Structures are given as C-alpha cells and as structure tokens.
Image (cartoon, coloured by chain):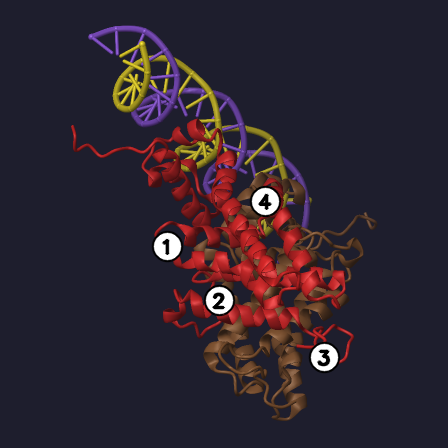
Chain colours: A brown, B red, C yellow, D purple
Amino acid sequence: MTLRAVKPQHETRRRILDAAEELFMQHGFEGASMRLLTTKAGVNLAAVNYHFGSKDALIEAVFQRRLDPMNAARLAELDRLEKEARGKPLSPEAIIRAFIGESLSMIEDSRNGGRNFVRLLGRTYTEPSKPIRTLIGGMYAGTMERFKAAFARALPELPSGELFWRMHFMFGTLSYTLAATDTVQLIAGFKPEDRHDSRALQERLVQFLIAGLLAPMPGSSSNTVRKAA
Amino acid sequence: MTLRAVKPQHETRRRILDAAEELFMQHGFEGASMRLLTTKAGVNLAAVNYHFGSKDALIEAVFQRRLDPMNAARLAELDRLEKEARGKPLSPEAIIRAFIGESLSMIEDSRNGGRNFVRLLGRTYTEPSKPIRTLIGGMYAGTMERFKAAFARALPELPSGELFWRMHFMFGTLSYTLAATDTVQLIAGFKPEDRHDSRALQERLVQFLIAGLLAPMPGSSSNTVRKAA
DNA sequence: TGATATTTCAAACGAACGTTTGAATCATAC
DNA sequence: GTATGATTCAAACGTTCGTTTGAAATATCA
C-alpha cells in the first residue's frame, strides 16, 4: 500500500470550491445546480451540505478563499510602496498598479483556477442578490478605504466627491474587463492572440485608467487635476 | 357601463414587460420566477406563455422593446452630427456623447421604467448565459460597427487594435455605471443627492471617457494620441 | 485490533420551477 | 342575439431544485 495515492485532508472541499468557481462563472449562482456542481467535482451530492452547510455558505467560501488573500496582497503592496516613499505621496499610477496588478495577473493563471475566479468576481460586482452584494462589499470595505486615502494623498486638488466617482469608474472598467474578456463580444476587432496576453492588457488598462483619473474637472479649464508633474 | 375603464389592446403584454424588466434587474433571469413575475404584473400565471410563448422569449422581448429604439436613437444622433459636420471628422467627445447620452438620460426616467431597463442592461453585459449574450451581441452589432468607424475617423493616428480596447474599456465603464449605481457600494463617500442627478453624472463620465480614449499609447511618449487640438 | 470520529453514499424529502390544459370569460362582428 | 375568435383563469403536469437522512465506508488513535 505504499504506492497508494494520498488523499489530502480537505481534498473534497478543494474540489468543490474549484468546480463551484468555474460553474458559478459559467452559469451564475442560481444556474449552477448542486447536482451539476458535485458531478463536476467528482463528489457526492450531499458533500456540499456536509462540508459547507448550504449552497449560500459555499458561495461565501468561494469568495473567502480568493478575495481575502487578494485584498491582503493589494494592501501589502500599498504598504510596501508607502514605506518606500518615506512619507511622500505615491504617484497615481503606482496606486492603480497596486490595485489592479494582482487581479490582472490572475487572468493568466488558468491552472490554479485564478482565471475563473477573477471572471466570476467581475460578474459579481453587478450581481443583484442583496446577500451577495453585502458579502462582497464587506470583504472590500477596508481595502477601498485605504486606497481611497492613498489616492486622496496623491491628488490633493481633487475634491473627495470627484475622487469617489473616478474610483467608481476605474473599478467599473476593471470589473468589466475581468468579466467580459472572451465572453461578450460587442465590438468587432478582437485579436485572438491578445486573449492571454495579460501584460499588454494590463498596460492598456493602466494607461486608460490613469488618463481617466487625471481627467480635467467637468467645469474646469483644460488642465488636468494634477497641477504639476 | 359608460364609465368603465378602457383596456388597451395589449395592456397585459405591457404589464408583463414592465414587471419583467424590474424583476430581472432585481433578481436576475433565473431568480425571477414566473409566479413572482405574473403576480407583480397582476396577470394570470399562464399569460406569459400565452403572449410570449416561453420565459426565454419574454427575456428577448424585454430587450427588443427598449434596445432597438435605443440603438436607433444613437445611430440617428450620429447621423445628425455627421451631416452637420459635412464630411469633417467628428470630435471624440461628440461621438461619446452620442453613444452614452441616450442610456444615461434613461436613468432619470423612473416613471416609464427606463431606469430599470438601463440597470438591467448594464448587468446583462456580463451575463454568462450564452443565448442571452448572443441575443444582446446581435442587437448591438450594427451600432458598434458604425461607432467604431466614427471613432476611427476622429482618431486616425490610433491603431485599430488600440481603438478596440479603448472602446471596450469605455463600454465597460458605462456598463458598470448603469448597473451598479445605487446597488453595489464598494467605495464609501457616495452622496445621496447625486443619485438622481444624471446630468452631473453624465459630465463626470464624459470627462473620464474622453481622457481614457485619448490616453497616450502604452509605449509612447507622454503625448496623447491626438496630435493637435 | 478494537473503539471512535469523520467522511461518503444512495435514496428520498417537500418545495418551487416552467409549462400545458381545457373550460370560462370577454370582445367583436354579423 | 348569436356565433366566432381572443384572452383569462384555476388546476395540474412532469421536472428539477436544495436539503436531509441513516446506513456504509473510511480514517484516527488507544
């Protein structure tokens, strides 16, 4: 029996989470049934309720597993940058990169399911279900607070009300980019070789977001909000 | 019986479409059941299948009713601008306004359900269901083609591959803005009085999108793609 | 090995789903 | 008024949903 394949302690949990991640992304939370999900995971139908309690708890666990480390990594990167800057405000670009870098690099991670998760995440921001919105909102609260403060320090001339909207727009662009890449195809002209080139995508997105963040104020002159480079 | 309220020819259809618009937005397509939907509409459970054939056909009808006129209005506005310009390329800002103006003004239209629809629409761009994506994609195809051509004429220096991505980002920002306003609340700082001020929202969004569209190329110098003002 | 948790399994639960049915009701035209 | 078609209605259809159950299998440790 020495050659018997070992069965890690919580392999069933992991298999369920992986299958759920992919099927929630493909069919939505309601569309992915327990039977489909457990079949794909190769576990018994009752396993979800045994290990997680309910389908809703499974949904929560799917986000917990990835979102907490993801936001922790964002905050760690922001901490690192701020320490490095020794009290000086960061550049808007650096803050943007700290926020989107982690999620965009996960797009390339198809082996560990990171790609599935970020696409699921992008879809979920516009999810109508109240409990899910509350869940996601709670997981983001602290991170958003810190990044908003960092942006405010980097852009002292930008009124707080405007900053809110520009973060809102930036987050929306990221969200849609994560969710809709190789799903919706509204605009013709997509080159298939771009699909997995997340480096090029990231650079394009960063340029777009920086420009939007530094856009002139609605009623102002043609200057950007950044007084001096 | 002279005072009896008249019943327009297809009032039942309209009531169903209105209820579906709101409930699809609130609960998603699968989450909004026929029983909930018909109860809200004040019609019999069998009315949907009688008037539309099936739930899927109802979903299609919900989008048909609003999306075709909406895209027709976008194209009409673009035609008007181009006629007015007498062959000269339009400004990027004018093209952007032609595209987003119609949908953003619907945000204020809560009486006729326009607000419900645009929020539903924003959510649907990231919908995983293949038939729905195909449906929406087909309804947008011609409009996107025309707007892409208009942008290409306005920005001749911008490579076509870049234009695709910038339209993608712009569309994402609009989509998220439509879908997530007063639903998701990830960033603290939202002022309730902004909620229905779609004029101010539109100006903020336009500034953000223009800046993103005209952003410098990823590898270029610090100039924007627009050679001269 | 034997006792004790832990995990898996097939089967079934009641509830809710989208849809169908056939009679009842309504509107319209002769 | 009566015949004809359109619409509404209560009831039921078969299916699938998330969940529960109690026994069987497996792992853990004295």
Q: Could you tell me which quadrant the N terminus of chain B lies in?
A: top left
Numbered disc total: 4
- Sequence-wise, the earlier of marks 1 and 4 is 1
On the image, numbered disc 2 is attached to which residue?
Answer: B202
On the image, numbered disc 4 is attached to which residue?
Answer: B139
Q: Secondary structure at mark 3?
A: loop
Residue B152 placed where, x, y %?
A: 70, 61
- Sequence-wise, the earlier of marks 1 and 3 is 1
> From what the image shows, is residue D20 above or below residue C18?
below
Both marks 1 and 4 on one chain: yes
Q: Could you tell me which quadrant the C terminus of chain B lies in?
A: bottom right
Report the front residue among B54 and B7.
B7
Q: Which mark is residue B223?
A: 3
Both marks 3 and 4 on one chain: yes
On the image, numbered disc 1 is attached to which residue?
Answer: B110
| Separation of residues labelled 2 and 1 (CA atoms) | 17 Å
- Sequence-wise, the earlier of marks 2 and 3 is 2
Q: Indicate the amino acid at tag 1.
A: Ser
Residue B13 placed where, x, y %?
A: 39, 35
| Separation of residues labelled 1 and 4 (CA atoms) | 24 Å
Q: Secondary structure at mark 1?
A: loop
Residue A78 placed where, x, y %?
A: 63, 80
| Separation of residues labelled 1 and 3 (CA atoms) | 42 Å
Q: Indicate the amino acid at tag 2.
A: Gln
> Label 4 is found on which chain of the structure?
B
Left or right for B146, reference B204: right
| Separation of residues labelled 4 and 2 (CA atoms) | 24 Å
Residue A81 found in image quarter: bottom right
> From what the image shows, is residue A221 above or below residue B105?
below
Residue A104 placed where, x, y %?
A: 69, 65
> From what the image shows, is residue B20 above or below residue A127?
above
Q: Can the viewer see residue A99?
A: no
